[in-house]
Amino acid sequence: LDSDAGAGAGAGARAGAGPGGAGRAPVSPLSPSERRRAELVQARQDEAAEQEEERAKRRKEKRQAKLRRQWAAAARIVLRSEEKLRSQRAWLRGKPRPIHWLNTFVRSGVFSAIIVIAIVINTILLAMDAKDNTRELDSALEQANVVLTAVFTAEMVLKLAGLGPRVYASDAFNVFDGIIVVTSLVELIVAAASPSGESGSIVGLFRTFRLLRVLKLAKSVKTLRILLVTTINSLPDIGWMSLVLVLFLFIFAVLGVQLFAGALAGLPSDPPYSFDDLFNSLFSVFQVLTGDDWTSIMADTAHATSGAAILYFVLLHAFGSYIVLSLFVAILLQRFSDQQDAAFDEEDYSEMGVLSLERSLLARDPTGFMAPPPTDKASS
């Protein structure tokens, strides 16, 4: 009985699925208003889907553009490193074996550690300089400066002999070190040639270059090197932001002259700031932006004029300190973020490191941006 009932139900279902559709439930037709509402909902859904697809496409294009920039930077690093290696090979070709040993030594970690220790000692000696030092201590500091100058001069000479002048000059940090060494030697020559008490200002001018020896740490410490290079690369963007800041200062300085000119002249405290002319107004506005006792300027101006002057200083401090000046920090943070995406440079790679880097870049290139370099049989 169950099988017969199932067969009958199946036959009824097949009969209902026939051409006439007699077994289907009747569907009531949509009214014109419901049809328009359904079409409107469908149009909104289609528009939202198109907008989401467009946003996804833009995000994908941005990721690809960023990835291309990173791989392009990596390719430039490889090319510069290979050029440096070719120059080193050309310099070492035909040179005696001591020059090869010297090349290996100046590129070793031991040599870098010696220079870092000398820089640290130089920093400590600079911190010991004071007005009340005894004659014996000043003499000892001068002798230590001569020894450190000899060490840094030996570093420059060894690098020139081991790396070659072309490779040495291709590194900006080496050029910077060479300038410091030359100024230190000029200082020693001027101090030795001048009698006691004469040419003190010239010798003091050259002595200020000793402070730049601290920046030599950027050559050996990668994190410090990245920080310094990123700050230098941010200078063009900061230049434009500086122009915006100057315009901001000018606008509020002119507004201050129009509102508060002569208002602070009759105060018994005789404050050093005023808005009588453009120069004094610029000075006062800049003091407010730096936050140096800006509430006193606001209180004196409000006392001399009216309480409405508080609104001027609040707007100046808010827009200047928290918006314009904060943009400088935002630019640096953006540069640091971009630098961390490609936080490597040719200083990190030795001769074998460059070749392995090139192979790894070509093997892991997801964009197809980098093509295998042509084989140079003559250079190889």
Image: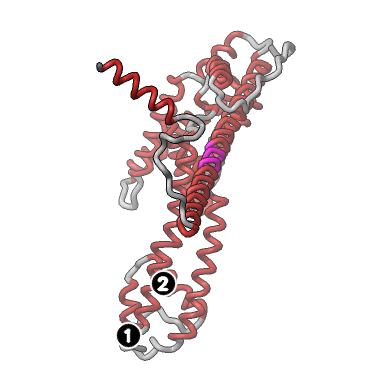
Mark 1 burial class by Cα count in 10 Å: few <14, some 14-19, many 20+ = few
Image disc number at residue 221? none
- Residue 75, position as x, y percentages in the image: 60, 27
Where is residue 328? Give x, y as percent.
46, 55
Q: Is residue 239 left or right of residue 196?
A: right
The residue positioned 45% from the left and 44% from the top of the image is 211
What residue do we see at 34% from left, 88% from top? 306
| Residue 59 lies in the magenta stretch | yes
Number of numbered discs? 2
Evaluate whether residue 120 shows in this view: yes
Q: Residue at x 56, y 56 (%)?
A: 239
**Distance from label 1 to label 2 (Cα)?**
15 Å
For the residue carrying disc 2, how many other residues have a C-alpha within 10 Å: few (<14), some (14-19), or many (20+)? some
Relative to residue 77, is residue 293 depicted above or below? below
What element does badge 2 sit on? Answer: helix
Question: Is residue 270 something that shows in the picture?
Answer: no
How is the model colour-coded? secondary structure
Q: Amino acid at mark 1?
A: Gly
Instruction: Tell me the chief SS of the magenta region.
Output: helix
Foreground pick, 11 / 353: 11
Q: Is residue 271 left or right of residue 63?
A: left
Taking depth in this image into account, of 161 and 377 the one nearest to the observer is 377
Please tell me whether residue 50 is drawn above or below residue 354 in the rendered image.
Answer: below
Q: State if disc 2 and disc 1 touch (CB < 8 Å).
A: no
Amino acid on which the number 2 mark rests in the picture: Leu
In this rendering, position of residue 217 left or right of residue 89:
left
Classify 328 as above or below 379: below
Magenta-highlighted residues:
56-63
Q: Position of residue 283 (x, y in %)?
A: 45, 73
Q: Which quadrant would the N terminus be assigned to in this image?
A: top left
Q: Which residue is mark 1?
A: 307
Q: Mark 2 — residue?
A: 316
